[in-house]
Image: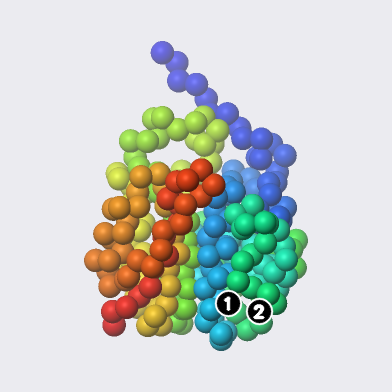
Amino acid sequence: MKTMEPFTPIQYMIGHTEFCGLDIIVNEDVLIPRPETELLVEEAVKLISEKHSAVRVLDLCTGSGNIAIGLMVRLRSPSIPGKAAEGGRAEGLTKSVSGCTIVASDISAKALDVARINAGRHGVLREIEFVQSDLFDNITGKLDIIVSNPPYIAGFEFETLQKEVLKEPRIALDGGADGLDLYRRIISDAPGHMNLGAHIIFEIGFGQAGEIKKIITSGGFEVIETKKDFNDIDRVIIAKWISS
């Protein structure tokens, strides 16, 4: 039987999509942002508002830059609407936050090119530091929050993915045999780059919460909360580093 060619997603055809109320440029070098990923931005906003001081945030595997840009724009203008927040607003933040710095990293130089274009379009290019890095390889300095939507598709799942998804860059989707390789690497390497008491916010795939929590707790982190998306699926895990 002849294998069908992947379908080009409409977002690639028109060259943009919406995320956190922002128009984000996309092409075949970057993953198409999903509405459920807005939960990462919302939870990062809440953590920043609770810390009462300037914080340094790292967006690992930034892709199109949607998370870092959505976060920086939200911090400067907290009334920007988003699908993930109740009532379309960011809860727990009543005024703009200054002094927060964001580093956005990706292994792909082409993805970072797209991310910089998006940051420039939304007026935050100078506020975000873009770094080409294989996870933490080129990351310097200590962090207060790591937010990441890493590749989490398991190898066997590629046979059943929608044709449109197969058009997206494999490097942004493939999480290894069980989909959890990047979570293991991040949890293993993150402590050397974090202030004690810093947080990690992960997006996770369907049915992965239990195994990822085991990875997190075995690495000296405490799971604080698991958040469900609008389809009632465990989508975000928030953890705190508690071991030195």
The one of 159 and 226 positioned closer to us in this rendering:
226
Q: Which residue is mark 2?
A: 97
Label 2 vs label 1, nearer the camera: 1
Q: Which residue is mark 1?
A: 49
First reached walking from the N terminus: tag 2 or tag 1: 1
Q: Is residue 213 above or below residue 12?
A: below
Q: For the residue carrying disc 1, how many other residues have a C-alpha within 10 Å: few (<14), some (14-19), or many (20+)?
A: many
- Residue at position x 53%, y 41% in the image: 168
For mark 2, give the secondary structure: loop
- Residue at position x 64%, y 73% in the image: 93
Quarter of the figure with the C terminus: bottom left
Mark 2 near mark 1, Cβ–Cβ under 8 Å? yes
* Residue found farthest to the top: 1
Q: For the residue carrying disc 2, how many other residues have a C-alpha within 10 Å: few (<14), some (14-19), or many (20+)?
A: some
The one of 67 and 43 positioned closer to us in this rendering:
43
The number of callouts visible is 2
User: Alpha carbon of mark 2 to alpha carbon of mark 1: how far?
Assistant: 8 Å
Q: Amino acid at mark 2?
A: Val
Image coords of residue 129 (percent x, y): 59, 73
Report whether residue 181 is seen. no
Tell me where residue 127 sits by quadrant.
Answer: bottom right
For mark 1, give the secondary structure: helix
Tell me where residue 75 sits by quadrant.
Answer: bottom right
The one of 73 and 159 positioned closer to us in this rendering:
73
Report whether residue 14 is seen. yes
The one of 99 and 81 positioned closer to us in this rendering:
81
Q: Is residue 122 above or below residue 27?
A: below
